[in-house]
Image (spheres, rainbow, N blue to C red):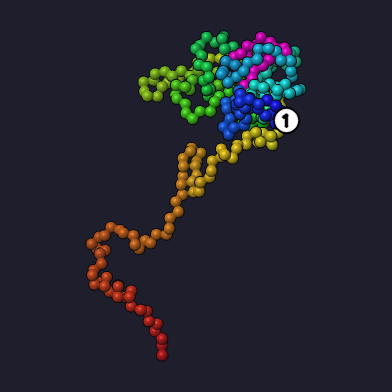
């Protein structure tokens, strides 16, 4: 591939297919996550990255080597790896005396840093420590957020949006009931964020609807919010903009309510109620003489009387 004035031109068919795959699309592919650790990482951080990678597979890339970088001071290395691996989400783990057991969740827009939130791990239970059956790889989770902070505080709102983007998985048109077996629950309480992972178990209930029970599957985190790097409102709005081709065309006189019910408005011409055919009763029938008299009155010209 050759680069002229910032435009990369392919030389072979293979490089052309590669560039076409990376090019912007109307419907983008599933977002991929890159998971990496810094120059100094504790055993807790290393195991936490592996467990989150297990939840994210197959839409994740795990870097096993250490990367000496500080995202809040210089994000160019993260942007480089994002463009190299075509990843729009990242998770960075580090450990030092000032900020022990550190996890940084972030996302990119056009291969440039958009949002980044730093969370400290205060308590952690690994996936292997909970001896229960696990969900299959690639299971789409159900996300539950509890706590007023997710609706009132600006930083928690952005964190909620980031976590939804991070764990939502692929977009599907329908999900079968048996496929709803993984729940990720986030609770914001007293300045902390509690993340719990459950597996839904469908059991017999004696009727058609099964009885649902939750079994803790792991991993489990007690997190505290540390530093944040949030995009400006204009950039955040630009990142959420949809292409015109994907926007639904408005149809006249058709609307939908919050439940998806379609309502239509029909415009009709004014109806002559005199010609409306009603039920004919004997008492309302007109005699033949009355009908002839009415016709003669209607046909007779009107004469204006003038007093002499």
Q: Quadrant of the N terminus?
A: top right
Q: Which residue is mark 1?
A: 4
Occupied quadrant, residue 52: top right
Residue sitting farthest toward the bottom: 308
Is any atom of residue 159 visible in this view?
Answer: no
Task: Confirm whether the magenta stretch covers residue 214.
Answer: no
Residue drawn at the location 66% of the way across and 26% of the way down: 11
Occupied quadrant, residue 72: top right
- Where residue 290 sits in the image (x, y, percent)? 26, 71
Vertical placement of residue 295 versus 246, above or below: below
- Where residue 21 sits in the image (x, y, percent)? 60, 27
- 116 or 22, which lies in front? 22
Left/right placement of residue 244 relative to residue 234 reads left
Residue drawn at the location 56% of the way across and 9% of the way down: 128
Occupied quadrant, residue 41: top right
- Where residue 57 sits in the image (x, y, percent)? 56, 18
Task: Tell me the SS state at disc 1.
Answer: strand
The magenta stretch spans which residues?
33-52
Task: Confirm whether the magenta stretch covers residue 40.
Answer: yes
- Where residue 166 sits in the image (x, y, percent)? 60, 24
């Amino acid at each position: 591939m050759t680069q002229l004035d910032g435009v990369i031109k392919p030389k072979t068919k293979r490089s052309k297919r590669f560039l076409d795959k990376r090019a912007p699309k109307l419907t983008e592919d599933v977002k991929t996550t890159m998971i990496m650790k810094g120059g100094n990482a504790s055993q807790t951080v290393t195991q936490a990255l592996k467990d989150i990678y297990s939840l994210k597979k197959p839409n994740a890339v795990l870097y096993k080597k250490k990367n000496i970088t500080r995202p809040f001071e210089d994000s160019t290395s993260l942007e480089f790896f994002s463009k190299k691996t075509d990843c729009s989400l990242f998770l960075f783990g580090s450990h030092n005396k000032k900020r022990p057991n550190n996890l940084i969740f972030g996302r990119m827009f056009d291969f440039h840093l958009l949002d980044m939130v730093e969370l400290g791990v205060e308590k952690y239970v690994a996936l292997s420590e909970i001896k229960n059956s696990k969900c299959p790889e690639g299971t789409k989770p159900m996300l539950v957020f509890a706590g007023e902070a997710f609706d009132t505080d600006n930083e928690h709102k952005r964190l909620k949006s980031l976590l939804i983007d991070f764990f939502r998985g692929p977009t599907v048109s329908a999900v079968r009931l048996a496929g709803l077996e993984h729940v990720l629950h986030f609770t914001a309480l007293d300045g902390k964020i509690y993340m719990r992972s459950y597996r839904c178990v469908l059991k017999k209930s004696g009727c058609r609807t099964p009885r649902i029970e939750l079994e803790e599957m792991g991993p489990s985190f007690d997190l505290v919010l540390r530093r944040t790097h949030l995009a400006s409102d204009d950039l955040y709005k630009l990142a959420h903009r949809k292409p015109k081709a994907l926007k639904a065309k408005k149809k006249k006189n058709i609307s939908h309510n919050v439940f998806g019910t379609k309502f239509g408005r029909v415009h009709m011409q004014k109806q002559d109620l005199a010609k409306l055919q009603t039920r004919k009763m004997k008492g309302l029938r007109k005699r033949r003489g009355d009908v002839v008299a009415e016709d003669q009155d209607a046909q007779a010209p009107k004469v204006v009387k003038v007093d002499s």
